[in-house]
Amino acid sequence: MLAKKIAPSIPFYYGWVVLLSVGTSAIVRNAAASLMIGVFIASMNTELGWSRTLIAGAASVGGLAASIASVPAGWIVDKYKTQIVLSISVLLLGIATISLSWVTTPLAFYIAYGLGRVLFNSTFQIGSSVCISRWFVKYRGRATGLLFSFHSIGMLAFPLLAWTIIQWYDWRSAWLVIGILVLTLSLPFTLLFVEHRPEDLGLLPDGDSSDTHNNDPEESFVEEVSWTLGQAAKTKVLWILAASGGILFLLQSGMNVHQAALITDKGLAPWVAIMGVSCNAIFTGIGSIIWGRILEFMPAKYAYSLDAITLGLVLGLFTLIQGPISVFVLSSLFGFAIAGILCIPPVTYANYFGRNNLGKIRGVTEPFISLGQAIGALTSGIIFDVYHSYDVALLSYCVLGLIAGVSFLVIKKPAYQP
């Protein structure tokens, strides 16, 4: 493989090349992000006559399917090379996104977009973060933060590009262009430069030498922890993290899918809505880097609790938006909070349970995330159709965020018994 030829010749740790290459998959996975469907929902509603609940329901169906697919996906990520898993995922996502430009029936739309959501929530989510957790231990926080800053690039660029194409052409052209970009921006990198783990290239995590690991037990302590899935499943910590994380992604999806529509429903111009979505994406990127560094000195449970409470309060405040400034401020805070729920879980699972079986462990926890996203997207749509307003949903999400924030305070790092 090309990685084996490049790694010895470059003057820096090859893990950073892996991070960049995996980062391209984090960018393009946004073709199936819940934020994307929010950009298309009004245009598809107008042309096809489909209700918002029906359109948002595709995200929910995909999330439900992903909750089933996540368990085998975690096993696949541990068993097979990461570059194979991510490359196949990019290829399938590109084909599914392109096919969305041809849909004329709800069934076809659900199949194509649902496949994208399955990939988004299973192989992309687990494969990319587990790969980075294998390549970095001491610098896991900042590396994970950088990974999800790549994700935020896609969050910003793809919805903005789609919105622009919709304004000048139509929503079908937008899906076609996004699908082509998925294939061209990521597939060459995942095929050529991603490697499963540093040991496959004769390296150690973080670029350390063997002498460093032998002489400094403190630096390699996390590396020595290696929980099996069976051991991890017997701890309460795993299931509290999984369930509370699922609640937070319910909040994320419930807002993301409907954010653009929510803003325009408040009587604000479409450009305010797209700028709000853009602020969300920009501060997800900024927040990813900040949260990544925070995790290197703050215990994960406190960071998680702070983030959950912030997310809940921000969603509650969205009921009060009145003008562009309030939209931009709250969207930025929302993006910062979303960065936390993206960055904190991968680092926490890896630090608590080790690298060796991380794919399998993440595989049994990701269904909570997928279910949360499925429930959130559908719930917001149903509440809007009943009340003709998102305020009831937002206030409910505020309460759920506060509950999740408190739940993280009761956990503690599990004691490993070899």
Image (spheres, helix red, strand yellow):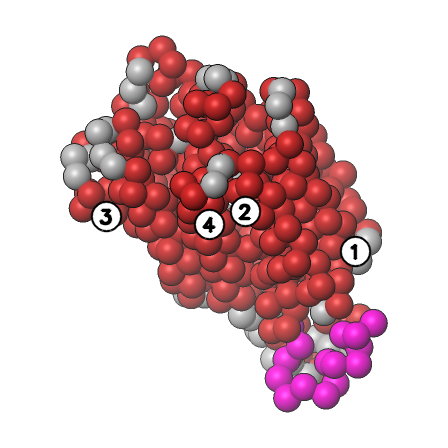
Spatial CA distance of label 3 from label 1 is: 40 Å
Tag of residue 30 = 2
Instruction: Please tell me which residue is depicted at 35% across the width and 30% down the height of the picture.
Output: 261
Q: Indicate whether 327 appears above or below 283.
A: above
Earlier sequence position, callout 4 versus callout 1: 1
Q: Circle 3 — which element?
A: helix
Tag of residue 84 = 1
Q: Which residues are magenta?
A: 1-15
Spatial CA distance of label 4 from label 1 is: 29 Å
CB atoms at circles 3 and 2 under 8 Å apart? no
Q: Indicate whether 81 appears above or below 214.
A: above
Spatial CA distance of label 2 from label 1 is: 20 Å
At label 4, the amino acid type is Leu
Q: Circle 1 — which element?
A: helix
At label 1, the amino acid type is Ile
Tag of residue 161 = 4
Spatial CA distance of label 4 from label 2 is: 12 Å
Q: Is residue 314 left or right of residue 165?
A: left
